[in-house]
Image: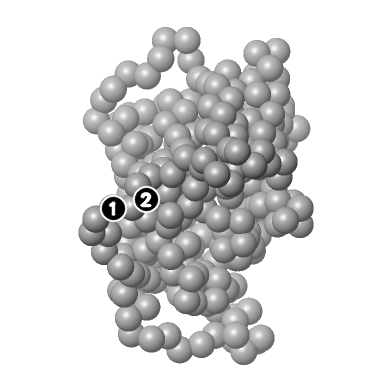
Amino acid sequence: MIRSYLLLLFCVTCWGSNFVFGSILVNEFPPLLLAALRLTMTSLFLVAYAWSTKKLKYLNPRDYLLLIPLGFIGTLLNQAAFFTGLETVNATTASLILSLAPITIALLASVFLKEAITGRMIAGSIVAILGIFFVVGKSDGLNVSIGTVYILFAMLTFAVSIIMMRKLTERIDPFVATVYSTVIGSGMVIPVAVIKEPLNHVSPHLWAWVMLIATAIVMQGLCGLIWNMQLKRVGAGKASIFLNLQPFVAMIAGFVLLGTPVTAIQIFGSIFIVGGVVLATSRKRDKANAMKHPISAPKPASVPKSP
């Protein structure tokens, strides 16, 4: 289990750093077109690797009943809602809303995957979210607007896609599921991006293309593969807790790479984030709480079974 946690930590470290690299690349490429190009590079990397290792397999037609909605919800709707929301919502508010994803995933996992939500996970999540408020929050709170609704929708689609991927990997190898879902998702995003943001707006700088390709392969291809494999081993709810570390990593990466100042209150919040993740993922169990009295949602009367 420790190895799985370290691999999840590696993924979150890369994804947290990706905010910094993304802020650099968004000055060279239009946002939605940037997402489409990165997804294309990621798809090519995964397909090439699968082909060279002969791990690419034909799927049962019923598997596409999850793969196609996964690409539509987790990639097309998620990316469109996120970038549309950012047109009117600042990055700080968007980050705060997106930090609700781990709690949302845990709740959805308790309903659709029957994963128990222990008191330790709830306490750790609360502590981590409190830390996120210090790192990326503002004292004036959130102002509800149409942009806020879009960002909230982006958070929800991300949470739903995590649950769908976890369900899919119950009968499909995580690597195969990652390849197919990425290719299908990119195939949906590319036409929308090309129509909205023509290709003549791309950056002519070589360094920008190198950074785009490198981040696509490592942060979206490799990390996506590792994450989905570990998701099957530790569970969606517990794995999602690590996502709380992203603002902390982004803050450190911004300081090192861009010279963004770090305030004392941000450091204080980071301690809460790390403490919350440690609390929520600790293997120390109390028999009364972890075995006899897990907090889980009651089994719904008619939850549709996966195809």
Judged from this view, the residue extending furthest toward the top is: 139
Relative placement, left or right, of 124 versus 80 is: right
Q: Residue 207's image quarter?
A: bottom right
Q: Position of residue 89 (x, y in %)?
A: 36, 28
Q: Which mark is residue 300?
A: 1
Please tell me whether mark 2 or mark 1 is closer to you in this view. 1
Residue displayed at 37% across by 50% down: 111
Return the residue nearer the eye: 1 or 262. Answer: 1
At a point 54% along the width and 85% down the height, the residue shown is 56
Amino acid carrying label 2: it is: Val
Residue neighbourhood size for the residue with mark 2, other residues' Cα within 10 Å, grouped as few (<14), some (14–19), many (≥20): some
Q: What x and y, as percent, mark residue 241?
A: 57, 41
- Residue 25 seen: no
Figure disc tally: 2
Residue behind mark 2: 111
The quarter of the picture where the N terminus appears is bottom right
Label 1: few (<14), some (14–19) or many (≥20) C-alpha neighbours in 10 Å? few
